[in-house]
Image (tube, rainbow, N blue to C red):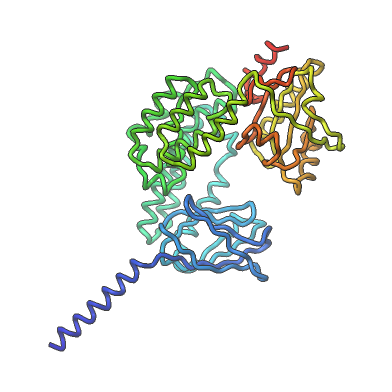
Amino acid sequence: MKKLIYSLLIFAFFSCQLEKEKEISYVLISGTVLNPTGDVVQISSKDFKIELPLNEENSFSDTLWIENSGYYSFRAGRESSAMFLTKGDNIQLSVNTEEFDESISYTGKGSEANNYLAKKYLQSELNTPSFDEFFSKDEAEFSSLNQSLYDQEMELLLSSNIADKHFVEMEMKALKYDYLANLSAYEEYHLYLTKDESFVVSDELYDPLTGLDFTNEADYNDFPSYRSLVSNHYVTDISDMDGLDSTFIRIDMIPSATIKNDLLNSFRYEFSPAHPYLEHFYALMMQVSSDEEFKIMLTEKFEKYENLTSGNTSPSFAYPTKDGNVISLDDLRGKYVYVDVWATWCGPCKREIPYLKELTSDYKGKDIAFVSISIDERKDYDKWIAMLADKEMEGIQLFADKDWKSDFVQAYAIEGIPRFILIDKDGKIISADEARPSEPKLREKFNELL
């Protein structure tokens, strides 16, 4: 009888322990940041974000209550690195922001996977060419390099002998999705970088994507690259009526409300006053979305966009140059006005600068004014001045008064930059979302107008 009672007590004890482990939903995390560029660090994921303050010793410590074990991002200033957090982890981190990727390291429970991720991203930084170089390569070179990078990362993962099998399975998926996402994005990025409008990829490039399920909600929540794949799959051709209708029919059939609503939210950047079927686009999004907040936001944008279609009077601007002279849209009456809304921190904006300079030079003396409006924050005014000099930027250079909240930016409902606007000689809108300087069709339009 005593043995039976003893056995039952042991069973009850271990059952309680197992139940306790199931209930664990936190991660203990602490760390030290050498040469910090701010007073907080940030840890985030798709549905999680927390800022942890640094103390006088530039250290931080906290308990993170997380819903899901998985991938997170650690950020200190402008530098960031991927993390993998598992409920019950007790991780200590150290990093020197002056050599971020080379110095970040982990100890404690959960460190094995995270030290692997640090090695992976350092290896990627050393072996992967720049975005422009990578996607400018011809198809054969790109395909070969993409495969090589995938093989190198798989070799690093398998040679790391990580004990956490769940992490290994997740990481194998992550690597595969990164590889596939590059394939999926290649044609669009290659066209953008090379301006070769005759370029078309071979069907063979997409063979690895055959049969991929684009409705997996779990993978959608876990892997950013899978989210990119899903987005690229559905954002095919929604610039014409047939493309709109077929795309929305497919989206409406997605069983996951999360994927469906996120996709519609991503279309907000395609949804512009220059869209040829703006009203139909709006109606389809309102019909398919089940996100009431999104629908309110979309309706507000649509009401603004109705006033930004071709032929309407343009919202005005009046902002200072670096010399303090205020120039307004009214000052430019009698000329076409091509407006570039940009910022010094915006990579795509900076990539357009050489093309914009070339346009400004080629159309010098014509009835067209080139106006660049910076929406940098006031604290970055000196950076703006320095970039004007460094890039030898021409045309009319203006600094907006309230960055994103400036009246002109708000009136045009601008949420992403660069944004280009074309206004006629009488101050009326030709296009509230005009082609970029790098696009050949812009010169064609200028030549027709001038």
Is residue 193 left or right of 185 when viewed as pictured? right
Is residue 285 left or right of 398 when viewed as pictured? left
Residue 270 at x, y percent in the picture: 53, 30
Image quarter of the C terminus: top right
> Residue 18, located in which quarter of the rendered image?
bottom left
Towards the viewer: 278 or 44: 278
Residue 131 at x, y percent in the picture: 58, 37
> Residue 367, located in which quarter of the rendered image?
top right
Q: Is residue 96 above or below residue 424?
A: below
> Residue 327, located in which quarter of the rendered image?
top right
Q: Residue at x 50, y 27 (%)?
A: 187
Q: Residue at x 79, y 36 (%)?
A: 388
Q: Is residue 284 above or below residue 48?
A: above
Towards the viewer: 281 or 14: 281
Towards the viewer: 198 or 313: 313
Q: How many numbered callouts? A: 0
Is residue 217 left or right of 363 when viewed as pictured? left
Furthest residue toward left: 1
Q: Is residue 389 above or below residue 331?
A: below
Q: Residue at x 52, y 28 (%)?
A: 188
Towards the viewer: 292 or 88: 292
Asked if one can make out residue 147 in the rendered structure from this viewpoint, the answer is: no
Asked if one can make out residue 203 in the rendered structure from this viewpoint, the answer is: yes
Residue 34 at x, y percent in the picture: 65, 64
Residue 25 at x, y percent in the picture: 41, 64
Q: Residue at x 71, y 24 (%)?
A: 338
